[in-house]
């Protein structure tokens, strides 16, 4: 990956902002970088193309009451823009080959359809963010004709895909061009001002200069309290205004533990390292799958096996905001095609109630809220910290105690501190004294509420 954080650029930007006249400043809306409305929220990724047989905004809108009942808060829509046809992969092309930043994909419906979708979500108390691909465009984006100087060129002066990728269907943008920066900020503002969306998930965010994001996010927050998610695991993204970054490291550890290649100690090391890299207020996105992992690596079941539900519960109880991808509530059993129509087979929504319970847990327990709205993380030592991962989340009088058997074997352990509470799922009251034995089946866990 390429990183463009430039401290000098940020200092210069700060100086420019400081020199803005009072008359220019007074029209700005003062918003919080971590608005309170995000404090207890979860995220749900929507693949419009594959969500329904129709693959349209209107067909997805009919699903909103079901998702609301499941406790879904923030809807992240994968790119809604027209997809490029030149050098496209497959028959439909990649969602991330954007042909027009200020239009909707006609396969999904009209602008009015999208506007109605946003309104219906808002009427249900839900929020909508959309995917934004700032790093590259489709080969046939009209900008290639009107503003070819906005693109990176190879040694022969030709458009080129992002360096080091096999993304032959897209071409790289060059943010050294100031006009491109202005255009992209205007396009980002367009969807907030005209359609009232609530923010963005930004594709390969740290492949785009950080000073651009600082300007763009400041501009958006002068209009609305937007929520910003960076596809990056880079602490500097928070410094320029992003609310949340990906917790890829957690994802990889989860898969390695489920496959018997790692153990609970690896989570301890990750948490210790991240405590020095990220601030308590920084949201991290916890997930067991997403559109990339599903399409290229496999389903949650195929990757996690018997540990599937355990690892899902872990993503809801560790610090961070949990993500659900389209189809997870039905335990989707297929890798969805990326460049073709491949509608989700919904079946009987076998995991929907489990997600409903986890979302309710997140909403009701302040100790599990996001960032510093939530509680501290305190490790609980056991007689077998190699296989057992236990911790408290504490905020004032609100305490959630979690004990996971992160192994495929039966475990019998003792606790180094007394624990007690009501098991969230079974409603069984549990009290374990110091050195009292606790038996856990493979991948079993307790989430105790005091």
Image: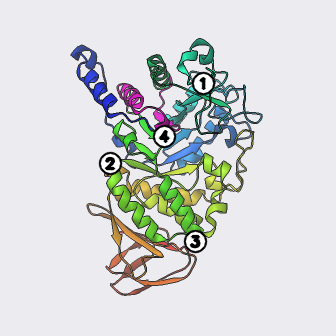
Mark 1 → mark 3, Cα distance in angstroms: 47 Å
Residue that carries the numbered disc 1 in the rendered image:
155
Corner quadrant of residue 60: top right
Residue that carries the numbered disc 4 in the rendered image:
126
Return the x and y of residue 317 as percentages of the image width and height: 43, 61
Return the x and y of residue 99 as percentages of the image width and height: 63, 24
Residue that carries the numbered disc 2 in the rendered image:
281
Instruction: Find the magenta span and give its range.
Output: 194-223
Q: Is residue 47 visible?
A: yes
Return the x and y of residue 36 as percentages of the image width and height: 34, 42
Nearest to the eye among marks 1 and 3: give it.
1
Height in image: 308 above or below 231?
A: below
For marks 2 and 3, the one nearer the N-term is: 3
Corner quadrant of residue 271: bottom left
Nearest to the eye among marks 1 and 4: give it.
1
Mark 2 → mark 4, Cα distance in angstroms: 23 Å
Residue that carries the numbered disc 3 in the rendered image:
260
Label 2, residues with CA under 10 Å away: few <14, some 14-19, many ≥20: some
Residue lying at the far front in this picture: please name it.
Answer: 155
| SS at circle 1 | loop
Mark 3 → mark 4, Cα distance in angstroms: 38 Å
Q: Is residue 123 left or right of residue 213?
A: right
| SS at circle 3 | loop
Residue lying at the far top in this picture: please name it.
Answer: 146
Nearest to the eye among marks 1 and 2: give it.
1
Mark 2 → mark 3, Cα distance in angstroms: 32 Å
Mark 1 → mark 4, Cα distance in angstroms: 48 Å
For marks 1 and 2, the one nearer the N-term is: 1
Residue 449 is tagged as none
For marks 1 and 3, the one nearer the N-term is: 1
Residue drawn at x 26%, y 60% is 396
């Amino acid at each position: 990956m390429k990183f463009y954080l430039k401290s000098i650029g940020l200092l210069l930007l700060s100086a420019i902002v400081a020199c803005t006249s009072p008359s220019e400043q007074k029209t700005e809306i003062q918003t919080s970088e971590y608005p309170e409305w995000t404090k207890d929220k979860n995220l749900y990724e929507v693949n419009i193309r594959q969500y329904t047989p129709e693959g349209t905004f209107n067909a997805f809108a009919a699903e909103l009451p079901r998702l609301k009942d499941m406790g879904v808060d923030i809807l992240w829509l994968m790119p809604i823009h027209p997809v490029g046809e030149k050098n496209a992969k497959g028959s439909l092309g990649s969602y991330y080959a954007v042909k027009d930043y200020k239009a909707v994909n006609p396969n999904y419906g009209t602008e009015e359809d999208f506007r109605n979708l946003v309104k219906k979500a808002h009427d249900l108390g839900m929020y909508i963010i959309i995917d934004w691909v700032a790093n590259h465009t489709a080969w046939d984006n009209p900008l290639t004709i009107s503003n070819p100087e906005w693109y990176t060129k190879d040694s022969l002066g030709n458009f080129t895909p992002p360096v080091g990728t096999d993304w032959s269907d897209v071409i790289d943008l060059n943010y050294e061009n100031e006009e491109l920066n202005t255009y992209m900020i205007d396009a980002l503002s367009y969807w907030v001002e005209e359609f009232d969306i609530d923010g963005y998930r930004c594709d390969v965010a740290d492949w785009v200069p950080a000073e651009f994001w600082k300007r763009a996010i400041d501009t958006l927050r002068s209009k609305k309290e937007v929520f910003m998610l960076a596809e990056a695991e880079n602490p500097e993204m928070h410094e320029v205004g992003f609310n949340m970054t990906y917790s890829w490291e957690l994802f990889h550890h989860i898969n390695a533990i489920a496959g018997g290649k790692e153990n609970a100690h690896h989570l301890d090391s990750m948490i210790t390292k991240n405590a020095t890299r990220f601030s308590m207020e920084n949201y991290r996105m916890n997930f067991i799958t997403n559109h990339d992992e599903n399409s290229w690596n496999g389903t949650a079941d195929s990757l996690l096996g018997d540990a599937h539900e355990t690892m899902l519960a872990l993503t809801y109880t560790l610090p961070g905001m949990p993500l659900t991808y389209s189809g997870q509530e039905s335990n989707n059993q297929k890798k969805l095609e990326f460049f073709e129509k491949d509608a989700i087979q919904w079946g009987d929504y076998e995991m929907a109630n489990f997600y409903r319970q986890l979302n309710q847990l997140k909403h009701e327990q302040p100790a599990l809220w996001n960032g510093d709205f939530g509680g501290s993380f305190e490790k609980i030592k056991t007689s077998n910290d190699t296989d057992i991962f236990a911790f408290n989340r504490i905020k004032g009088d609100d305490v959630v105690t979690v004990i996971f058997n992160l192994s495929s074997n039966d475990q019998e352990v003792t606790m180094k501190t007394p624990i007690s509470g009501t098991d969230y799922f079974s409603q069984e009251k549990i009290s374990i004294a110091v050195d009292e034995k606790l038996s856990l089946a493979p991948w079993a866990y307790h989430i105790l509420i005091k």
